[in-house]
Image: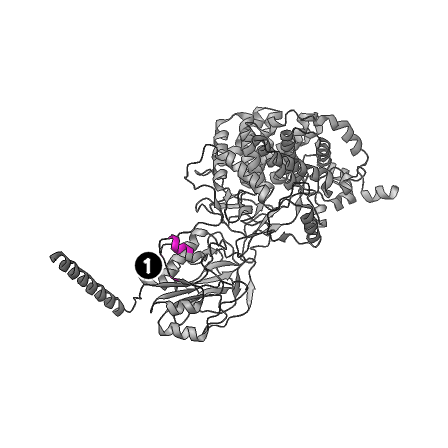
């Protein structure tokens, strides 16, 4: 009895204390009753992040319900569920009710709002989010950059917005400040409400970046809206995320799993064409259209109709990415090499068949090696087209693209135990050799129109100098391989002359003078050691590879560094206006913590692998092992977007451990994923490691030399003069 009385007394006392505390809080002019109410769909990113952070909040399907049910003096989040198709309607009566209850509102993408003039919706191209004011604390420094991919926003004016959209250069910070043209997208009204002129609450679904910065922004924004509930804990996993954390313990078979994941990506990427989709893509390519949404259904082709270039960097509001439509030659062969290596490793007949079909498509069935390139009387005979489907791609003869196509074909053919592509390979080697000048340099590209005008002898007799391993080194590697198989001296002479001249001006005389060039050069130098193992050749390899790995980070990454270059077109933007106008690196200044999986990491990996195998140098092997572990960790994973799972995006910020960088490249931004290039050479190298071999050793038994006489006869049908004159003689 006495215990019951005591319990009742304690309960009454606690109730009295609670009332007193509430009264005290109400008397404080800055205090608000704790409460956060949502009007949004259940899957809304912000709402789910709050739930995963351990906080439950009432959620309603309409602004009216949310405002009716919200506690007085609390905060209400009104999300634009039908964005970007429809703007959110919050009528005057609801706003009066909110004012009467002293609610503080967050409203996004509204049809109208008191005190604001809102224009018609418009989209972005190069604009990024920039933090501009501390009037609303977002937890991020002024001029800090954020990516709001493909957002639609409403034009308005504001004297002190917290966040604006603007075209600005920079990695993390708008280094040149704000341009005159900028668009407020997050602001506070005179009544104390927060208005976003676009949708910000679905930051996870829309893959806004960097992902951790958006959690910081929303944590501080909720703390501002509802101080009594601070700190607000938000927990969210990015839709597409790295396979492993920086310090996660890797499974013993992590490389094998990575190769399997990459092969799975090719199969489910929705980029392998069926006959029906090949026709549709051909039609839009002829119109000059190079991007298209991914198909809704996963209906993979079998390789016999080719594979598209990959995914563009453009991310749509639903988190999907646009596909790049070009049918590139290099992507066909590089994809085939990965599938052949993985198929042979796992006994996967489907992957091996797909690889074979891709090579048949490339060399026999598509226009990539046909037309003028299939006519022995034409000066372009033997070359492999840059791409198919449109004139702009068909005319291109890039030596480095031809070389990567050939290197990948070597790997695929060896794993498939087939020699049926040997003759077209040798024709391509001979075509590139005879358009290479006396000093071993070919130049960036020799397209069909000037080749017709000048004839191939014009290029063969030139004393071209092009100190650009990015363009020249892989053709040299191919020439060294061809010499080893055929003993044709011109292959060796031109490769050695070009390499010697290039090393004589290293590094100051190189076009970019940094990792973009170094990563390509390592493979050529490794194979030069294979052909002629001299002290000088080993010294060159140790010099370039040593400079490369001295920049390697503890996590294994080799940072993108390009700003020491004095020549070439590949520079960080020098102004806000220059952002998005050319091909550019991923960083703005040296020291930005980013690796480039399109232009550097992948080529460093295959180069270090071949160099370590050629020299048995433990330092090179250690650097290769560190780099491959990094590559395995940053491979993409996604449950909701399986067609983006298992590849590599171009950019990775190894300090944040997130896919982020400056993304001003006019063609291939931070979030692009090629079927060839980066993903393929990461996969090819991992595949070679799993087969305990190198590309040189794998292809050692090639019998390509059997076709030398036949190819020589075919090539001799053109005398090297201009094509127009040759046609007039007939």
Residue denoted by label 1: 230
Q: Nearer the viewer, residue 189 or 438?
A: 189
Q: Is residue 391 in sight in this rendering?
A: yes
Which one is nearer the viewer's eye here, 465 or 298? 298
Residue 11 is situated, as x and y percent measured from the top left of the image, at 19, 61
Which of the 4 image quadrants contains residue 520?
top right
* Number of callouts: 1
Query: Is 711 positioned to the left or the right of 525 in the image?
Result: right
Mark 1 neighbour density, 10 Å: few (under 14) some (14–19) many (20 or more) = some
Residue 338 vs residue 275, the one in the foreground: 275
In the image, residue 13 above or below residue 510: below
Residue at 53% over, 70% down: 119
Residue 136: image location, x then y, percent: 39, 63
Residue lying at the far front in this picture: please name it. Answer: 1
Q: How is the image coloured?
A: one colour
Residue found farthest to the left:
2
In-image side of 567 versus 434 (left or right): left
The C terminus lies in which quarter of the figure? top right
On-image quarter of the N terminus: bottom left
Which percent across, then down, holds residue 86? 53, 66
Residue 160 visible in the snapshot = no
For mark 1, give the secondary structure. loop
Q: Is residue 49 magenta?
A: yes
Rendered location of residue 268, percent (x, y): 58, 44
**In the drawing, does residue 678 fall left or right of residue 94?**
right
Magenta stretch contains residue 26:
no
Q: Which residues are magenta?
A: 48-58
């Amino acid at each position: 009895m006495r215990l019951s009385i005591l319990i009742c007394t304690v309960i009454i006392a606690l109730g009295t204390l609670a009332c007193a505390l509430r009264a005290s809080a109400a008397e404080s002019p800055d205090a608000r009753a704790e409460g956060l109410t949502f009007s949004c769909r259940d899957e809304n990113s912000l709402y789910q992040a709050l739930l995963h952070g351990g906080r439950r909040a009432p959620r309603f399907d309409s602004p009216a319900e949310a405002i009716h049910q919200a506690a007085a003096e609390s905060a209400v989040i009104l999300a634009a569920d039908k964005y970007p198709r429809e703007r959110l309607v919050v009528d005057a009566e609801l706003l009066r009710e909110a004012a009467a209850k002293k609610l503080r509102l967050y409203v996004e993408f509204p049809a109208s709002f008191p005190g604001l003039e809102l224009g018609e919706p418009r989209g972005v191209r190069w604009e990024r989010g920039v933090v501009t004011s501390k009037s609303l604390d977002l937890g991020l420094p002024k001029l800090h950059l954020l990516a709001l991919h493909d957002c639609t926003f409403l034009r308005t004016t504001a004297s002190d917005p917290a966040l604006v959209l603007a075209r600005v250069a920079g990695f993390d910070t708008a280094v040149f400040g704000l341009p005159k043209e900028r668009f407020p997208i997050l602001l506070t009204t005179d009544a104390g409400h927060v208005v976003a002129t676009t949708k910000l609450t679905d930051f996870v679904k829309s893959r806004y970046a960097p992902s951790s910065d958006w959690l910081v922004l929303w944590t501080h924004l909720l703390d501002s809206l509802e101080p009594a509930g601070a700190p607000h804990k938000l927990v969210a996993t990015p839709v597409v995320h790295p396979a492993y954390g920086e310090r996660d313990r890797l499974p013993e078979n992590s490389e094998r799993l990575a190769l399997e994941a990459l092969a799975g990506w090719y199969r489910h990427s929705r980029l392998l064409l069926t006959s029906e989709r090949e026709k549709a893509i051909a039609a839009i390519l002829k119109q000059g259209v190079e991007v298209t949404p991914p198909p809704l259904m996963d209906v993979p082709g079998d390789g016999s109709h080719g594979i598209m270039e990959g995914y563009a960097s453009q991310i749509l509001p639903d988190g999907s990415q646009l596909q790049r439509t070009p049918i590139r030659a290099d992507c066909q062969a590089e994809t085939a090499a990965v599938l052949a290596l993985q198929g042979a490793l796992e006994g996967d007949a489907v992957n091996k068949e797909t690889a074979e079909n891709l090579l048949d498509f490339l060399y026999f069935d598509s226009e990539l090696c046909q037309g003028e390139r299939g006519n022995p009387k034409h000066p372009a005979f033997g070359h492999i087209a840059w791409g198919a489907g449109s004139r702009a791609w068909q005319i291109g003869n890039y030596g480095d693209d031809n070389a990567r196509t050939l290197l990948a074909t070597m790997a695929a053919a060896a794993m498939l135990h087939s020699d049926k592509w040997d003759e077209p390979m040798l024709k391509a080697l001979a075509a590139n050799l005879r358009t290479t000048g006396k000093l071993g340099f070919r130049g960036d590209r020799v397209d069909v129109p000037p080749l017709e005008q000048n004839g191939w002898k014009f290029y063969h007799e030139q004393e071209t100098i092009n100190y650009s391993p990015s363009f020249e080194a892989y053709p040299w590697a191919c020439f060294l391989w061809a010499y080893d198989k055929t003993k044709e001296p011109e292959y060796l002479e031109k490769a050695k002359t070009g390499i010697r001249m290039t090393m004589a001006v290293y590094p100051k005389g190189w076009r970019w003078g940094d990792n973009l060039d170094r990563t390509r050069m390592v493979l050529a130098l490794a194979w030069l050691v294979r052909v002629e193992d001299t002290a000088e050749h080993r010294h060159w390899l140790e010099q370039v590879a040593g400079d490369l790995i001295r920049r390697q980070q503890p996590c294994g990454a080799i940072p993108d560094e390009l700003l020491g270059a004095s020549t070439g077109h590949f520079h960080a933007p020098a102004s806000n206006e220059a952002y998005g106008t050319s091909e550019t690196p991923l960083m703005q200044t040296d020291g930005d913590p980013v690796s480039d999986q399109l232009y550097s990491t992948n080529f460093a990996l295959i180069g270090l692998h071949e160099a370590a195998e050629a020299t048995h140098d433990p330092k090179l092997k250690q650097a290769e092992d560190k780099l491959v572990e990094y590559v395995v960790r940053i491979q993409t994973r996604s449950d909701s977007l399986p067609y983006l799972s298992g590849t590599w995006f171009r950019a990775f910020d190894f300090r944040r451990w997130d896919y982020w960088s400056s993304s001003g490249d006019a063609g291939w931004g931070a979030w692009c994923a090629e079927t060839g290039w980066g993903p393929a050479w990461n996969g090819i190298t991992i595949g070679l490691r799993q087969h305990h071999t190198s590309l040189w050793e794998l292809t050692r038994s090639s019998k390509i030399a059997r076709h030398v006489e036949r190819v020589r006869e075919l090539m001799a049908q053109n005398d090297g003069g201009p094509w127009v004159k040759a046609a007039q003689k007939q």
